[in-house]
Image (cartoon, rainbow, N blue to C red):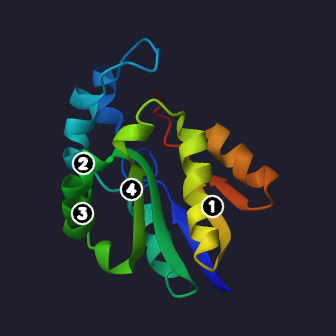
Amino acid sequence: MRDAYIFDVEGTLSDFAHRLHLAPKVRSGEENWDAFQEQFKNDPLRDDVASLLMRLSGFGEIFISTGLPEKRRDDLFNWLDYHGLLPYINQIFMRSEEDKAMRTVYLKIGHLRSIGNSGYKVRAIFDDRADVCAVFAEKGITAFNINSGAHI
């Protein structure tokens, strides 16, 4: 089995504090995140986390697991390329249109399953969400809660 490391994007590799005012205030599963996600392309890179990603790429494959919707794939590729991270990334998992109402933690469990089924042993996940980190830790995976202080 090959080793793998999973990185979240928003709030982990990127700092989204500048767009928090655009996040929906009420969580119903039907909220519109377009305005918030549209501004992703302007997020600054978290250099500390990016440096860690680059270093870990020498020890295993890097996967991105993000709640960003598939329609933002070009924005994500451009953002990763602009910040010099694209060459380090093996595969990117995003939220499909069918998954738009799914809680992020369940979405990422599905991503984990896909990575494991591809012959990888996930060694660690880096995410800004405590619920995601807790679920991965329960599964025996080292989970680093990358907390920027900005929360949705």
Amino acid on which disc 4 is placed: Arg
Q: How far is the residue under mark 1 from the one under mark 4?
A: 27 Å
Residue identified by numbered label 3: 77
Amino acid on which disc 2 is placed: Arg
Q: Which residue does the image show at 64% across and 55% down from the upper left? A: 144
Q: In which quadrant will I find the N terminus?
A: bottom right
Q: Is residue 49 left or right of residue 17?
A: right
Residue identified by numbered label 4: 46
Answer whether labels 4 and 2 touch (C-beta < 8 Å): no
Sequence-earlier tag: 2 or 3: 2
For label 1, the crowd category at 10 Å Cα-Cα, with few meaning under 14, some 14 to 19 and many 20 or more, is few
Q: Position of residue 145 (x, y in %)?
A: 62, 49
Q: How far is the residue under mark 3 from the one under mark 1?
A: 23 Å
Q: How far is the residue under mark 3 from the one under mark 4?
A: 16 Å
Residue identified by numbered label 1: 113
Amino acid on which disc 3 is placed: Phe
Q: Which residue does the image show at 64% across and 70% down from the upper left? A: 116
Sequence-earlier tag: 3 or 4: 4
